[in-house]
Image (spheres, helix red, strand yellow):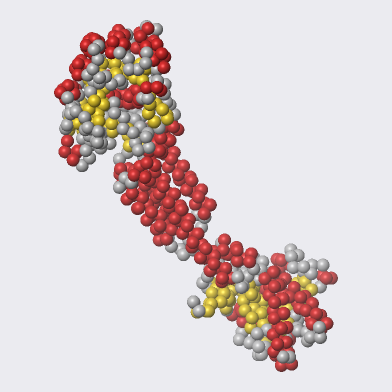
Amino acid sequence: MNSDPAGKSPLLRPATLIGLAITLIAAVLLVQQISLLEKVEEHLLDYRFILRGARKPPDGIIIAAIDEKSLARVGRWPWPRRTIATLIDRLAASGAELVVMDVILSEPDRDDPLLARAIRDAGNVILPVVFRFPPEAGPAAPQVLRESSPLPVRHAERFGDVPPVTASGVMMPVEQLAREAMGLGHINMLADEDGTLRWETFVIALDGCLYPSLALQTAVRLLGIPPEQVAVAATQGIDLGKRFLPTDPHGRMVINYYGTAGTFPNVSIADIMDGSAPPERLRGKVVIVGATAAGIYDLRVTPMAAALPGVEKHAAVVASIMTGAIIRPVPLWMNLALLLTSGTLFSLLIPRFSALGAAISTLLALALLALTGYLLFARQGLWIALAAPGNNLLAIFIAVTAYNYTVEEQRARKIRAMFSNYVTRTIVNELIDNPESARLGGELREVTILFSDIRGFTTFSEQHSPKEVVAILNEYLEAMTDIILRWNGTPDKFIGDAIVAFWGAPLPSDTHPEQAVGCAVEMRRRLGELRDQWQRQGKTPLWAGVGINTGEVVVGNIGAEGKKMDYTIIGDQVNLCARVESLTRKYDASILLTEYTVAKLREAVAAGRLGNVAISGLEQVVVKGKEQPVGIYRVEEDADTGGPVITEPAQWQVVKLSEK
C-alpha cells in the first residue's frame, strides 16, 4: 500500500477526485437510462437466470402439447375445429380447472358452432387475441372484446408521462367463439432489441381501454378474484384483490422463467385424444394448450433457452403470479445509492494501492458486486442494476491507473534525471520503485562523508601544461568515481582536484560508515596502481589524502529551482570532514577517520566485516572554527591483523590547530 507522500487527506488526492468525478458521470448516465447501459444490464440479468438454473415449477399447471407425436397422429397443423372441440370436451371430462388456449382461432370455419358449444359446455376456456402495432393497422376493438376484457384504471393521469403499450388494431377469435369463452387475453410477446423475451406485457391499450395478457387473465380466474377487484394502478402495477402485482411504468413485468423447454409437465394431445393420458393427471389443473413442435414456429429466445415454446412462457408467468415469485427491479434511487456508495468507497480506496493491488481490488469489488446482485436475485427476487456500478468501478480503475502511471512516469523521469549523475543505476531504480525513500526537498539525515584531496596539486599544475593536468586529473577522478559508485556512494561534487562523496542518502543505509571506509581503502589501492602506471609512462605520480566523518547533515536539492540545483549535503559535519582530510598531511596518513565514524564501526569490527584493516587512534584535535576536540584515527591495511582491529592510544593528546 502506497503512503501519501504529500500528507494530504484522501479526499484531496487527484486520483480520488478523478474517481468521484467518474462516479458522478455514471450517476447521470444511470438516471438518464442510457440505452447501452440498459442493454448490458439485460445481459447481466440473463446470466443471473443461467447461474440460478432451473427451478421446480408449482403443481397445478400442465401443458397440453401440440408436439411432433400429436402432429403425426392427429394430422398437420392447423387442425379442424371439430378436432379442437373434441380436445376441449376431453379436457372438461378429465376435470381440468381451466383450459387456456394458446391457439388463435381467427378464421371462420363451418364447424365453429360445434366448437362454440364445446367451449360453452366446458365453461372454463380462455381464448387468446393478438394486438397489432403501428405501422400495421387493424380493426378497432370489437364489441365482444370491450364487453369481456377491459380493466379499470386508477390514476389514469399518470399515463400522461409514461403511456402504456398501445396497439393499432386487434386480431380476434371468431366472434361466436369469443362470446362463449370465459375470458380473453392477448398473447403478444414483445422481445427486446436483441430478440430475447424478458418481459411480460400485462396490459395493452386499444381505443382507450386496457386489455390483459392471457397469463394475467388465467391467474385472475385461477385465483378466483372477482372482476371488480382487478384494476390497473397506472405506471405502478396491477391490483389483484388483496394482492398487488408490481410492474414497470409501461405495465410490464420481468418474466421469472423456471427453466428450459420441458420444465413444466407436458402431456401430448395425442395421448389426451386417444384416452391414454390418465384423467387424474389433468384433474384440477390449469391446462394450457399450445405448440411445442418446432415445425409450428412458436419458439422464443429467452435468458435460459435459445428456443423455448411460447406456451412455456405463459405457464411461467401464471406460476409466478400464483406463487408470488415475482422478479422486482429495485427503485432507481436504490440503484443510484449503490452506484454512489460503491464508487465513492472505491475512489477513496484504490489510489492507496499499487497497480497490481488496484487490479486485485477491482476484481474483488466486481466479484462482491456480482455476488450481491446474484444473491438478491436468487433469494429475494430483486433485480439490482449491476452494469452501471460495475462499469463505474472499471472506469475508475482504468482512469486512476492511467493517471498514476502518468504521474509515476513523470516522477521516475524526475528522479532519474536528478540522481543518475550521483548514484548507481541500481539505486536510481530503487528510488523510482520507492520514491518515498528520497525526499526531493532538504531533510536532516545521518550520513558518512568522504573528502579526498590530491596533495601538492597546485605545484603539479604549475609544473605541467593545462592539457597534461586535465588529462591526468580526469583519469584520476574517473577511477575514483567508479569506486565510489561501486560502493553505492553518492558523488557530491568535484572541487578542483578534491572529491566529496557521502553514504546514507538518498537511500537510507545501516552500514554507511563501513561502505565509506571500504571505499577509501579501495581508492588508496587503486591510486597506488595508477601511480605505478604513471611512473612507467614517465608521468608525475599523484598522492591523495582521504578524510571520513559521520554525522547529521542537511541533504536534498539545493539551489535555484528551474535554473541550477544540486543534490548535495551541507552542515558543520561536512566542514569537519574537510578539516580532517587536511590533517592527512600533518600525520602522513592516507586515510583519517573521526571518532564519530569509529564509534559507528565498532560493531562491524567486532563482527569482522571490514577486512584486514587496522584503525589506530592518534590525537584529539581542535580544528579551526571548532571548540570541542575530536579524536582522529588512522586507517591502514595490515594482513597480519587477521581481521579488523581498533587500537586506542595510551593517552589522548589534545592539539589545537589554527591552520586549515
Residue 600 in view, yes or no: no
Please provide percent x and percent y for residue 38.
35, 42
* Quarter of image, res 82: top left
* Picture residue at 34% right of the left edge, 36% below the top: 192
Who is closer to the viewer here, 238 or 588? Answer: 238
Q: Residue at x 52, y 73 (%)?
A: 442
Can you see residue 43?
yes
Q: Nearer the viewer, residue 532 or 34?
A: 34
Quarter of the rendering occupied by the C terminus: bottom right
Q: How many marks?
A: 0
Which one is in front, 650 or 322?
322
**Residue located at (57% from left, 61% from top):** 433
Which residue ends up furthest to the bottom in the rendered image? 462
Horizontally, residue 611 falls left or right of residue 46, namely: right
Extreme right residue here?
640
Q: Position of residue 488 (x, y in %)?
A: 66, 68
Looking at the image, residue 528 sits to the left or right of residue 262; the answer is right
Of the pair 153 and 660, the residue shown nearer to us? 153
- From the top left corner, tell me how far across and down residue 566 is, in percent: 56, 77
- Quadrant of the rendered structure where residue 67 is? top left
Q: Is residue 535 left or right of residue 429?
A: right
Dividing the picture into quadrants, the one containing residue 305 is top left
Horizontal side, residue 416 vs residue 540: left or right? left
At a point 43% along the width and 62% down the height, the residue shown is 8
Which percent across, then down, holds residue 374? 42, 36
Vertical side of 32 occupied by 247: above or below: above
